[in-house]
């Protein structure tokens, strides 16, 4: 039976290609595009194939990504399925179709999965950032903004914090932020002295605590921080703001055993 197989069915690429290049019959090309053992032969068939239904089948099911991509490129926009687009988004190696598809995605769960892969990470992160910014720009609802601001993984977290006026939410973010960037941004929206005191004492990040101390005007609060904090940097900042409160400085000197 092997003798009766067409030459393009050969697993010897050179022999198969030589025959495939001569085929022009659309029916034979359709069979070649689906059944030729050599991917290069299937590509050759696709280049000459006009049958859109066969191209759809190949674009969705061929074992070789490059063959699927070749078929996809020959299809009109309206025949490019979601399955094909997802395939290219995942498996493309920086080709223009992959960039275009990822730039149009709105499924944030899927985009987040793409950020775990090196070839797609930058593209997916960029798209998530765009969607996040759009989400923040389109709302002034404090509950939504607070939810975004509390989400450490949200790509537009800082922009949400900037728009947030809910003082309780800002305080919570400032105290809980371990990395500091979000907490420092939250500090900018807080003027309440008691809140700033709580942040200075409880902040998980040192730079956030320092920013809070720098905004405190209440001398007694600064004195309490200087006396209770174990962080010398925080103590120094508090003391520098107490230069005009000589009585409190004197009390501190009398009660502190640290010569420095």
Image (tube, rainbow, N blue to C red):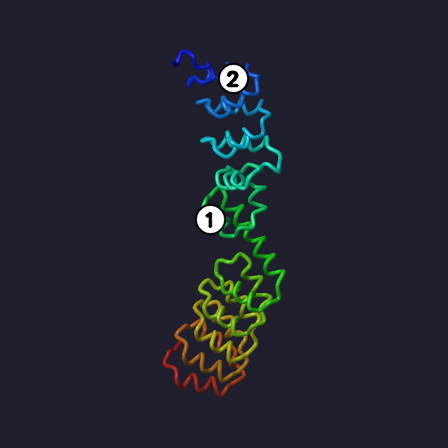
Give the residue drawn at x 55%, y 80%: 217
Judged from this view, the residue extending furthest toward the bottom is 247
Q: Give the image location of residue 191, x and y in percent.
A: 57, 76
Depth order, front residue of 26/199: 26
Q: Residue 177 has which mark?
A: none
Q: Is residue 81 above or below residue 21?
A: below
Front-most of residues 91 and 156? 91
x 62%, y 37%: residue: 77
Note whether 15 is above or below 165 in the view shown: above
The picture quadrant where one finds residue 143 is: bottom right
Q: Could you give the CA–CA distance between mark 1 and mark 2, rounded to whole angstroms?
A: 40 Å
Label 1: which secondary element? helix
Q: Which mark is nearer the camera, 1 or 2?
A: 2
Q: Which residue is mark 2?
A: 20
**Disc 1: CA contacts within 10 A as few (<14), some (14-19) or many (>=20):** few
- Residue 101 position, x and y percent, is 57, 42
Quarter that holds the C terminus: bottom left
**Residue designated by label 1:** 113
Q: Where does the N terminus fall, quadrant-wise?
A: top left
């Amino acid at each position: 039976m092997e003798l009766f197989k067409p030459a393009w069915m050969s697993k010897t690429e050179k022999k198969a290609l030589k025959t495939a290049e001569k085929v022009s019959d659309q029916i034979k090309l359709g069979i070649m595009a689906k059944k030729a053992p050599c991917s290069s032969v299937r590509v050759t068939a696709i280049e000459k194939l006009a049958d859109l239904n066969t191209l759809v089948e190949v674009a969705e099911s061929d074992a070789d990504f490059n063959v699927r991509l070749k078929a996809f490129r020959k299809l009109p926009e309206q025949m490019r399925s979601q399955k094909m687009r997802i395939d290219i988004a995942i498996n493309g190696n920086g080709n223009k179709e992959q960039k275009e598809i990822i730039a149009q995605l709105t499924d944030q769960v899927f985009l987040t999965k793409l950020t775990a892969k090196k070839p797609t990470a930058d593209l997916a992160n960029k798209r998530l950032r765009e969607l996040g910014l759009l989400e923040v720009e389109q709302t002034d609802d404090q509950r939504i903004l607070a939810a975004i601001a509390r989400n450490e993984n949200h790509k537009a977290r800082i922009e949400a914090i900037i728009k947030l006026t809910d003082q309780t939410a800002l305080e919570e973010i400032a105290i809980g932020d371990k990395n500091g960037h979000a907490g420092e941004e939250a500090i900018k929206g807080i003027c309440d002295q008691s809140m700033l005191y709580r942040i200075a004492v409880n902040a998980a990040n040192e730079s956030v605590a320092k920013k809070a101390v720098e905004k405190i005007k209440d001398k007694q609060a600064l004195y309490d921080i200087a006396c209770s904090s174990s962080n010398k940097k925080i103590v120094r900042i508090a003391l520098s703001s107490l230069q005009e409160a000589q009585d409190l400085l004197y009390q501190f000197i009398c009660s502190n055993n640290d010569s420095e």
